[in-house]
């Protein structure tokens, strides 16, 4: 018997390398779910190894949505993500199936939960001027400008150059930062489940995954990306912001050894995981569980929905 349609969509999140994709696949196969990805970089065609994108076999076993929907030469932003994710969720529900949102891009997940931001459209001329200033003054200088007037907005940037440029552009035009414009109501409600693993275990998983990626020719994938984009452009095209691709490219170019690149990527992964966990608690309002507790919580949500429909 198919599961009843939930009043709230289950959402599973965890920091990088914690194993959320494997848990999601197991749950999807157990309950007949369809997965809606919430990852800022698996949307790009050609970025397979370095993003740990689900394999063709996994995608054949369980329907996945919002993978391979953009070219690396373009930019994919949160507004497009929310629109396409909500459309995917609606499509799954319309077919009488249950969607499971899975991913670690908390900026995207927060927008899903709160609704699409109402920030005004970009102004190309102002944006170009800010991009030139970024190249001249550097990221820290622009972040300091934001922090001087709105420390909370500066923290929300998470040192992402595209967000810093966007926030600066909007502030210069309107006197307000993007976070002050509010959001339209979200289309769906969500039951958020977040989990992680103990620090040493998570770091060991990060290192093992990076080594496996290099063994699978991550350097070659990064070299292909570099052939499509200029890795020195500021702000970097969105695809170049994917964790580790610059290090993998440096390995392919003979500028870094795999061992040095691995150490750098693992360090960056640890720092990213720390930011993810902070955002899960503060932006998503989630209690961070163990993997076993997370599976139990999602199962309870799905079983409760089934019980409610029967009664």
Image (cartoon, helix red, strand yellow):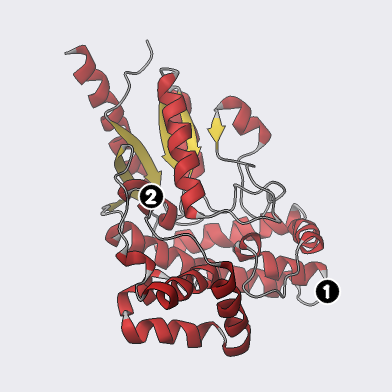
At label 1, counting other C-alpha atoms closer than 10 Å, the crowd grade (few under 14, some 14-19, many 20 or more) is few
Q: Which mark is residue 254?
A: 1
Q: In whole angstroms, how far apart are the C-alphas of marks 1 and 2? A: 43 Å
Left or right: where 204 falls relative to 156:
right
Can residue 19 be spotted in the picture? no
Left or right: where 309 falls relative to 125:
left
Which residue corresponds to mark 2? Answer: 116
For label 1, the SS is loop
- Locate the C terminus by quadrant: top left
Q: Nearer the viewer, mark 1 or mark 2?
A: 2
Can residue 2 be spotted in the picture? yes
Q: Quadrant of residue 211?
A: bottom right
At label 2, counting other C-alpha atoms closer than 10 Å, the crowd grade (few under 14, some 14-19, many 20 or more) is many
Residue 291: % across, % down: 37, 46
Question: Measured along the vertical axis of the image, is residue 261 above or below residue 194?
Answer: below
Q: Residue at x 48, y 28 (%)?
A: 34
Residue 67: % across, % down: 60, 41
Residue 26: % across, % down: 47, 32
């Amino acid at each position: 018997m198919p599961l009843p349609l939930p009043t709230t969509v289950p959402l599973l999140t965890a920091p990088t390398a914690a194993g959320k994709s494997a848990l999601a696949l197991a749950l999807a196969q157990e309950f007949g779910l369809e997965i809606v990805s919430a990852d800022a970089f698996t949307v790009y065609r050609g970025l397979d190894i370095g993003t740990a994108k689900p394999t063709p076999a996994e995608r054949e076993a369980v329907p996945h949505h919002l993978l391979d929907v953009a070219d690396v030469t373009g930019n994919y932003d949160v507004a497009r993500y929310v629109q396409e994710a909500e459309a995917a969720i609606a499509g799954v529900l319309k077919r009488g199936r249950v969607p499971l949102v899975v991913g670690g891009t908390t900026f995207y997940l927060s927008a899903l939960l709160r609704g699409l931001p109402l920030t005004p459209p970009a102004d190309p001329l102002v944006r170009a001027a800010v991009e030139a200033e970024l190249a001249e003054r550097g990221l820290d200088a622009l972040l300091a400008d934001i922090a001087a007037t709105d420390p909370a907005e500066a923290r929300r940037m998470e040192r992402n150059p595209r967000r810093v440029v966007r926030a600066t552009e909007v502030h210069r035009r309107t006197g307000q930062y993007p976070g002050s414009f509010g959001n339209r109501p979200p289309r769906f409600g969500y039951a958020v489940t977040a989990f992680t693993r103990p620090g040493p275990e998570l770091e060991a998983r990060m290192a093992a995954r990076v080594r496996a990626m290099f063994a699978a020719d991550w350097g070659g994938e990064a070299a292909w990306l570099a052939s499509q984009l200029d890795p020195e452009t500021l702000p970097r095209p969105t695809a170049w912001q994917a964790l580790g691709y610059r290090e993998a490219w440096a390995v392919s170019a003979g500028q870094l050894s795999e061992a040095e690149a691995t150490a750098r990527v693992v360090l960056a992964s640890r720092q990213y995981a720390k930011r993810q966990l902070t955002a899960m608690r503060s932006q998503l309002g989630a209690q961070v569980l163990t993997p076993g507790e997370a599976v139990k919580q999602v199962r309870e949500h799905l079983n409760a929905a089934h019980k409610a429909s029967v009664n």
